[in-house]
């Protein structure tokens, strides 16, 4: 893939960071606002796809590293499974942090309330784990397909 | 003959669809709603999360999310294996 025109690249430079910040906002506020790990991860991965198509596969290799994203994906899934095993004192998948007064353990006001970040027990941690997994999974898919397309094109032009 | 048979079958099926669409119950009034009422009333106090959907996805039905994440991981493994660079 060649890089696109100067206009597209300038706009990408402007909004790339904001898309990533919005994606992480959706991930981290998953237990308070609509959205969560899957949705926020998809938003961040769309920023990766934007960078890839506007700058081309070769030029964006410095920013998007396949190996790093693969490791991040495995870490996200392992973190998720590890959190599920932490509640094993009572049952698998037990929400042991909710309403405990500890980390993410404040009690919520029942009914309509503005929302407290420090609630939800295990749910925010699982949101972050799933978000890491989804963003790196979709990023890896996009990067691998782009590099394969580039390889095929080079082979055909020979 | 075949066309007549097909036409009659289509008409019967169409009338069945129309009649069932007319007799359908009102939108937003399910027959069984005990589970929904339980989630809406107790999710905030039990899990502490404001977002009931998040508390269902990550707490009550956590196994589903575990399977989903594993499916995504497996899909990525398959794509990486499919698009890997084969060198001699």
Image (cartoon, coloured by chain):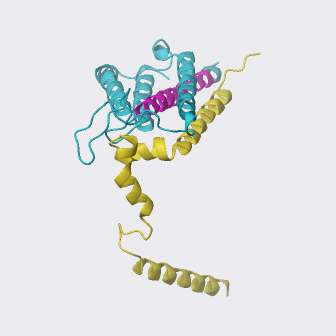
Chain colours: A cyan, B yellow
**Where B44 falls versus A133 (above or below)?**
below
Left or right, B13 with reference to A98: right
x%, y% of residue A30?
37, 36
x%, y% of residue B67?
59, 41
Q: Residue at x 62, y 87 (%)?
A: B4
Res. A7 image quadrant: top left
Residue positioned most to the top: A62
Does the magenta portion include A122?
A: no
Q: Residue at x 40, y 37 (%)?
A: A36
Res. B29 image quadrant: bottom left
Prevalent SS, magenta region? helix
x%, y% of residue A35?
37, 40
Left or right, B70 with reference to A101: right
Quarter occupied by the C terminus of chain A: top right
Does the magenta portion include A144?
A: yes
**Where A34 falls versus A12 (above or below)?**
below
Count the numbered circles shown: 0
The stretch in magenta equals A124-153
Left or right, B26 with reference to B64: left
x%, y% of residue B54?
41, 42
Residue B30 or residue B50, whichever sits in front = B50
Q: Residue at x 34, y 42 (%)?
A: A34
Q: Residue at x 46, y 14 (%)?
A: A59
Residue A96 or residue A136, whichever sits in front = A96
**Where B46 falls versus A73 (above or below)?**
below
Residue A90 or residue A14, whichever sits in front = A90
């Amino acid at each position: 893939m060649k890089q696109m025109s100067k206009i597209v690249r300038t706009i990408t430079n402007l909004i790339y960071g904001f898309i990533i910040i919005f994606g992480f906002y959706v991930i981290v506020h998953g237990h308070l606002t609509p959205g969560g790990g899957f949705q926020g991860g998809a938003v961040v991965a769309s920023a990766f796809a934007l960078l890839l198509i506007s700058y081309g596969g070769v030029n964006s290799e410095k920013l998007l590293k396949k190996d790093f994203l693969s490791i991040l994906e495995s870490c996200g899934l392992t973190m998720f499974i590890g959190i599920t095993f932490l509640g094993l004192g009572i049952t698998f998948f037990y929400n042991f942090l909710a309403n405990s007064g500890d980390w993410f353990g404040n009690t919520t006001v029942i009914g309509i309330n503005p929302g407290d970040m420090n609630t939800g027990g295990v749910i925010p941690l699982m949101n972050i784990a799933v978000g890491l997994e989804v963003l790196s999974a979709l990023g890896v898919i996009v990067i691998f397909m782009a590099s394969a397309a580039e390889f095929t094109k080079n082979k055909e032009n020979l | 003959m075949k066309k007549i048979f097909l036409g009659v079958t289509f008409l019967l099926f169409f009338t069945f669809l129309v009649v069932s669409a007319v007799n359908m119950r009102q939108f937003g009034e399910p027959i069984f709603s005990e589970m929904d009422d339980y989630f809406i009333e107790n999710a905030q106090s039990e899990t502490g999360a404001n977002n009931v959907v998040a508390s269902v996805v990550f707490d009550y039905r956590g196994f589903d999310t575990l399977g989903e994440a594993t499916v995504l991981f497996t899909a990525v493994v398959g794509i990486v294996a499919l698009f890997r660079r084969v060198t001699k």
